[in-house]
Image: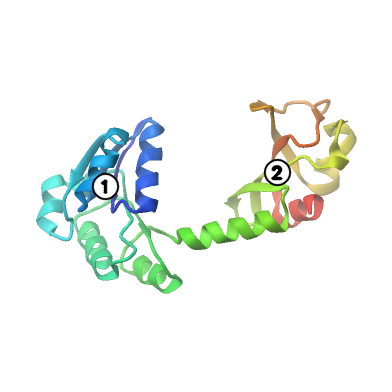
């Protein structure tokens, strides 16, 4: 179901978020005070507006607080970010996601009303370090506490073996959910499924168990 998003501040972070949300079928309003940036993104979002939301009258005129989620990419101007979040929350904004540049900024923004704060550089650096440490790890998603959904490459020791032979669920408490082979993804629904070295698989389990098996 399509949702309504507004992305304010179109640096690298905001620009890409706005484009991807629109590509996924959502309604996206993109706002930036740089006219060139707005011109460049106008074909990749629902509507692009060249304005400065530091003027609260603009927020009221556009009724930004009525959107499902508001994404703020104004990390370089902390004062403007704080005032904008405070005003939007006071107006009843449902959910605000903000970019921050430092951990201190993150804590401040959470305290004044942001529902979620992202440190893009920190997250990218963390993923890169993990990838360099273990090339088999492609991506991971935290589901709850230490339970992960991890995208990994099938190691040589698993090549041409069935899930029944590997018995990962009983030996390691890990469940293989999906295999991606030659660009095609298949849901794994039986133990006779054969894995091949180099394929991608999505596995679910505790982080310590996944690390132990694939490191």
Residue shown at 24% from the left, 44% from the top = 38
Above/below status of 213 relative to 119: above
Above/below status of 196 relative to 58: above
> What residue occupies the far front of the structure in this picture?
36
Give the image location of residue 17, x and y in percent: 39, 45
Above/below status of 154 relative to 122: above
Q: Secondary structure at mark 1?
A: helix
Badge 1: residue crowd in 10 Å (few <14, some 14–19, many ≥20) = some
Side (left or right) of 168 relative to 98: right
> What residue occupies the far right of the structure in this picture?
165
Where is residue 195, by image quadrant? top right
- The residue closer to the viewer here, 33 or 118, is 33
Residue shown at 39% from the left, 45% from the top = 16
Q: For residue 215, which numbered disc appears in the image?
A: none
Residue shown at 28% from the left, 67% from the top = 77
Q: Which residue is mark 1?
A: 37
Q: Secondary structure at mark 2?
A: strand
Q: Which residue is mark 2?
A: 152
Query: Mark 2 or mark 1, which has the lower sequence index?
Result: 1
- The N terminus, quarter of image: top left
Give the image location of residue 177, x and y in percent: 69, 35
Label 2 or label 1, whichever lies nearer to me, is 1
Where is residue 101, by image quadrant? bottom left
Side (left or right) of 189 relative to 149: right
Badge 2: residue crowd in 10 Å (few <14, some 14–19, many ≥20) = many
Give the image location of residue 130, x and y in percent: 66, 57
């Amino acid at each position: 179901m399509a949702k309504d998003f507004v992305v304010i501040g179109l640096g690298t972070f905001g620009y890409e978020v706005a484009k991807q949300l629109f590509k996924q079928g959502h309604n996206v309003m993109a706002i930036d005070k740089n006219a060139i940036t707005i011109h460049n993104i106008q074909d990749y979002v629902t509507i692009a507006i060249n304005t400065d939301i530091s003027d609260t009258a603009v927020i009221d005129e556009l009724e930004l607080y009525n959107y499902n989620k508001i994404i703020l990419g104004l990390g370089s101007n902390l004062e403007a970010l704080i005032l904008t979040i405070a005003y939007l929350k006071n107006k009843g904004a449902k959910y605000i996601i903000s970019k921050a540049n430092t951990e201190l900024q993150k804590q401040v923004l959470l305290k004044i009303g942001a529902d979620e704060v992202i440190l893009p550089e920190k997250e990218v650096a963390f993923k890169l370090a993990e990838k360099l440490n273990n090339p088999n790890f492609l991506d991971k998603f935290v589901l709850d506490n230490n339970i992960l959904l991890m995208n990994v490459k099938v190691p040589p020791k698993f090549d041409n073996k069935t899930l029944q032979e590997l018995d990962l669920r009983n030996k390691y408490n890990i469940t293989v959910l999906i295999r991606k082979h030659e660009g095609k993804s298949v849901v794994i629904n039986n133990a006779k499924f054969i894995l091949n070295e180099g394929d991608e698989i999505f596995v679910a389990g505790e982080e310590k168990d996944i690390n132990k098996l694939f490191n």
